[in-house]
Amino acid sequence: MENVTDRTSNPFGMHPDTDAYVPGYGDANADFHVVGDHPGAHGGAETGVPFTGTDAAVRLQHALAAVGLVDEPGDEPAVDDLFVSYRHMGVVEGDPSAADYAEMEPFFDAELRAITAHVLLPVGRAATEHVLEQYTARRGKVDTSDMAARHGEEVHGSGFLVVPVRDPREWEDGDDEALADALADLLARDYRRESDLGRFLTGPDPYLVR
């Protein structure tokens, strides 16, 4: 099923009960979904777009641009086959509490499942642990204590392919190239996560869903 919308920002009309928030942004039918933590960590409080407005966010954009997922880095980047969002979209003072995350979880989960990307790219340890726990069968099986070692690594879960990304605020020389190389390798082959449900239908044609 294809999402039909002409909106790049907040394509599904998420409106949490908070004074300020940074909604998801990008292609509503994207194959790649970048998942960050919250605006205070990864930018966008001033621009309204995830992963913008900070040097670290721009560096991540340029790494994605190296493989064509971002066409024009900036405060309103032109993207191709890419969606970006936050686990906690609200703009809060300091870090969100456990209760804050729980309150925003339905919005994040609904948007992630609406996009239904083939590849999830969680940014930073907190987002990576959450994605692995909630959207794969690899809970507790992937060591996230050293995100430098997990950076750009493929984790095959059930339903999603996960590629953890080290927090760009912590990147060292070569981390941007390492991510671009990992994504280029992925894009060079069939990365799609699809199931053929045609066996449940009459007729010989496949019915692929993701």
Image (cartoon, helix red, strand yellow):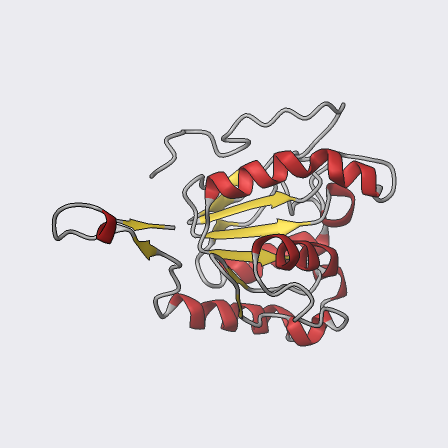
Residue, x 84% and y 44% (percent of image)? 95
Residue, x 37% and y 70% (percent of image)? 188
Residue, x 51% and y 29% (percent of image)? 12
Would you place residue 200 above or below residue 178 in this image? above
Q: Which of the two residues, 61 or 148, is positioned nearer the viewer here?
A: 148
Q: Return the x and y of residue 143 as percentages of the image width and height.
A: 71, 72
The image quadrant of residue 61 is bottom right
Q: Farthest residue to the right: give it.
A: 94
Would you place residue 178 above or below residue 14 in this image? below
Q: Is residue 80 left or right of residue 147?
A: left
Q: Which of the two residues, 36 or 76, is positioned nearer the viewer here?
A: 36
Q: Return the x and y of residue 11 as percentages of the image width and height.
A: 50, 31
Q: Return the x and y of residue 108 as percentages of the image width and height.
A: 62, 39
Would you place residue 97 above or below residue 126 in this image? above
Residue 193 seen from this side:
yes
Residue 96 seen from this side:
no
The image quadrant of residue 2 is top left
Q: Is residue 95 left or right of residue 24?
A: right
Q: Return the x and y of residue 194 as percentages of the image width and height.
A: 36, 56
The image quadrant of residue 38 is top right
Residue, x 33% and y 39% (percent of image)? 1
